[in-house]
Amino acid sequence: MAKTNPGRFFEDYAIGDVLTHAVPRTVKMGERALYHALYPARHALYSSDQFAQQCGLPFSALDDMIAFHVVFGKTVPDVSLNAVANLGYAEGRWLHPIWSGDTLRSTSEVIGVKQNSNGKSGVVYVRTKGWNQHDTVVLEYVRWVMVRKRDLDRPAPETVIPELAKVVDPADLVIPKGLDFTRYDFDLAGEPHRWGDYEIGEQIDHVDGVTIEEAEHMIATRLWQNTAKVHFDATFRPDGQRLIYGGHVISMARALSFNGLANAQIIVGLNGGAHANPCFSGDTIKVWSEVLDKAETVAPGVGAIRLRLVATKGGDPFRLKGEDGKYLPEVLLDLDYWALMPT
Amino acid sequence: MAKTNPGRFFEDYAIGDVLTHAVPRTVKMGERALYHALYPARHALYSSDQFAQQCGLPFSALDDMIAFHVVFGKTVPDVSLNAVANLGYAEGRWLHPIWSGDTLRSTSEVIGVKQNSNGKSGVVYVRTKGWNQHDTVVLEYVRWVMVRKRDLDRPAPETVIPELAKVVDPADLVIPKGLDFTRYDFDLAGEPHRWGDYEIGEQIDHVDGVTIEEAEHMIATRLWQNTAKVHFDATFRPDGQRLIYGGHVISMARALSFNGLANAQIIVGLNGGAHANPCFSGDTIKVWSEVLDKAETVAPGVGAIRLRLVATKGGDPFRLKGEDGKYLPEVLLDLDYWALMPT
Amino acid sequence: MAKTNPGRFFEDYAIGDVLTHAVPRTVKMGERALYHALYPARHALYSSDQFAQQCGLPFSALDDMIAFHVVFGKTVPDVSLNAVANLGYAEGRWLHPIWSGDTLRSTSEVIGVKQNSNGKSGVVYVRTKGWNQHDTVVLEYVRWVMVRKRDLDRPAPETVIPELAKVVDPADLVIPKGLDFTRYDFDLAGEPHRWGDYEIGEQIDHVDGVTIEEAEHMIATRLWQNTAKVHFDATFRPDGQRLIYGGHVISMARALSFNGLANAQIIVGLNGGAHANPCFSGDTIKVWSEVLDKAETVAPGVGAIRLRLVATKGGDPFRLKGEDGKYLPEVLLDLDYWALMPT
């Protein structure tokens, strides 16, 4: 048993530590085919090489959430194996497209620790970076998790809570090199709605729904080499249910938002996100969006739009929290992100 | 809600309209790997580059039904989102192989409209074409569907019913450039039976069966970017069942027919087809075939065979319709197609 | 019905016969993506081109068990369609890496026959070889199965039982050309444990578990073009259960053994194996390993380790057989193999 990885506990994290996560991954079009089979992903820029070329890119990149999942999956054995809860995300930015054949690896720097008052666990903040084979950072984000202590007698470390931006400044968003939406083909993209057609405060019910199956979320989660027991082993939780990886809900929600946001092609920023309630097999996911902000960019024909993306397993759209300020029980995900659209 | 696609209703189709369907798709070997994992596809020409080269092709093409599903899937948001029923197919022809890396898109021309006597719906006929990135038509077929009216007060359009061939004339079948079966390796193909060994009227029980799972039909249907709610959302139908995409049954049936028709390598014509009864998860699909016709071709060593392919979810083989002339309740599919075999 | 393959019966095998199995298969990165989505496969050498290059290989090969499954799957229609039981494996060796784009085919030579005393069945021994498109043997192994007789009146053939090595001699293991573990990156591989850190007799509980789904084992089994009815057709067995392909359990077990054996990168020998009890959907697979032997190799920094890999569906680890010498009912797999590790 000494040879298996017990995971890190709260006292194993010190400010400034940089963790090198294991098992780099070469991703190709097989991973994309699976992604498009597991989620109803239809954004044209990630579906057609010719569409991408007409937008100034050399060819179609892998979906932005593939980058996120691969980078995130590698952190699980070092960051969240003993996690009690995934508490939040901030300052996420996609910095470089992922092309077929790229090899991704991840590192995480510990940027915050705070022991809980019960002395049994604490919150750890890490800034994770995903790297390609050219040592270019392709993605970065901050994530904080609640982690158990192994040795309850260990004194609490000095509390360090990082200052995190509530929203990624649109001036800091990185636009893929060469991107140009001035010759954007709205017919082939699937909807006529431009950046200028969306108003701040506008809400969109995306209408479509998908009922979740055990086989699908496990196939997806394994594809990202995320091996947290709780997603795979029905004997692990007392209730015999397999908890669905939160990222599966994010990708399903993002794909379902195509119907009404077909032109929100590229995810470039992750401002925040909450996995409000657990998702299980048999739940039917539906989603709605709200336009939170808009910003101009320097790229030709390209605007940025800040969106709230909410996934639910029932109930009416556009309801998020109860009078107590807590998420309603049917809300699964509340995500806040920046996307790029044709102006 | 104004931003989501409500789909077209009967009165939105006018003779001569050409619909450009959205979201072109670059298909590669990842899609093929998934196809061969979802269906027991074993035709050697689509499995081995070397086998294909020995038959005069540059390498193995993507399975013919992949072309059909991708082209068909793109039409769903514009043709069948409000469809009550998929009524028939005719004049289908595969015109060019699909190679790994090709980008497919679809267009449909409205060639017939006929309002139903109840005034609530009508039948729309479209001729759909699939195109590759070189603007070559790779596939075409006629399909007709019953579509709801939105505005019941709108006067009926002038009835136009296209004249459709009952059977694609074998002289019009297009044989892949270079195809030559004179050095065909029957051992590697899996069966010794040549075109000359099949007799018109001969029936074949393909023996094998596959029990259908929710995860599999949803993965398959999403892979073709077909997003009709009824296939994915268990809350959509009053009975809580997800209706399985008819194309999933076609591909399963075609693959199961390998056992007895291993040398019917290439699908080149679709004469007609009926989805006789709905298919649901848990059904066990078995198939039988009947030789309807045979024709010679100009390609070396290549014969054409016209086959009826019937998929059932129980019952004995070779039974199709009851005394009332209606399909038996266990019949799922009755397909009429042309394939190419070594003579 | 005459056109379908009835499979071979005991009396159809004669010593010295060489069977050419049908349907060669070109395998690419799509097959690998699926493999890594179906199993929690994380060995770095098969995940990252850069990691493979640092170990002296041109790029990342397809997982060793992909080679096994593809080669094995082709033999099913000729060897095990009428098999009552898969009895054993021996003298398995991986002889050449499988690169993306390779085309695999299989042949089997009959090397043993022994009619059972009941006269209704017999044991057939075959030596199967997998070949790539350059006519190089990439894998070979001996397998013996119990097969039904068709004609009970046929006299028994002369009994021939091949002499099979209990263990592949480590001197006969073939190391991939160029392999060099002297610059092996243990951080990226995921564990610090070297060949020298493992002791003969040491046992490892791999801790993780996966609950099996119907959709997943069927997708996997079809991917290898293994079409034995019993895996797919819920109406085939009287109990309505689909028997899971034993190879699915092998691959799941091998992948789960990563946690504790992350550096046992390459499978090079298969000494033996028993599918101790049947596996069905809903079973939760857990695994443990035992170090059976160790050997040095001539490749730089490379050691060979002989491992017992046991998969169970419950019970405590390290328990294998009861007092009666029979496998405990929760044991699914008992596999004996050689792997290569950094010294």
Image (tube, coloured by chain):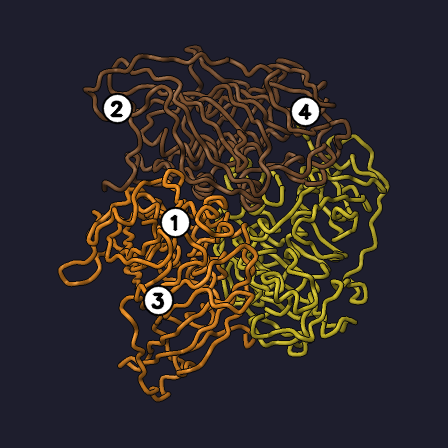
Chain colours: A brown, B yellow, C orange
Q: Is residue C332 visible?
A: no
> Which mark is on residue C172?
3
For badge 2, the amino acid type reads: Lys
Callout 3 crowding tier (Cα within 10 Å): few <14, some 14–19, many ≥20: few
Mark 3 lies on a secondary structure that is helix
Which mark is nearer the camera, 1 or 2? 1
Callout 1 crowding tier (Cα within 10 Å): few <14, some 14–19, many ≥20: many
Front residue (pair B18, A186):
A186
The residues tagged by marks 1 and 3 sit, at their Cα atoms, a distance apart of 20 Å
Which mark is nearer the camera, 4 or 1? 1
> Which mark is on residue A106?
none
The residues tagged by marks 4 and 1 sit, at their Cα atoms, a distance apart of 48 Å
Q: Is residue C271 above or below residue B332?
A: below
Q: Is residue B247 left or right of residue B158?
A: left
Residue C8 location in percent, x, y?
Answer: 44, 76
Q: Is residue A225 left or right of residue B103?
A: left
Indicate the chain on which mark 3 is placed: C
The image quarter in which residue B337 lies: bottom right
- Residue at 69% across / 54% down in the picture? B98
Residue C132 location in percent, x, y?
Answer: 52, 65
Q: Which residue is mark 1?
A: C181
Which mark is nearer the camera, 3 or 4? 3
The residues tagged by marks 1 and 2 sit, at their Cα atoms, a distance apart of 36 Å
For badge 4, the amino acid type reads: Met
Q: Which residue is mark 2?
A: A149
Q: Which residue is mark 4?
A: A341
Evaluate whether label 1 is on the same chain as label 2: no
Indicate the chain on which mark 1 is placed: C
Q: Are marks 2 and 3 in contact (CB under 8 Å)?
A: no
For badge 3, the amino acid type reads: Asp
Q: Is residue C272 visible?
A: yes
First of labels 1, 3 by sequence position: 3
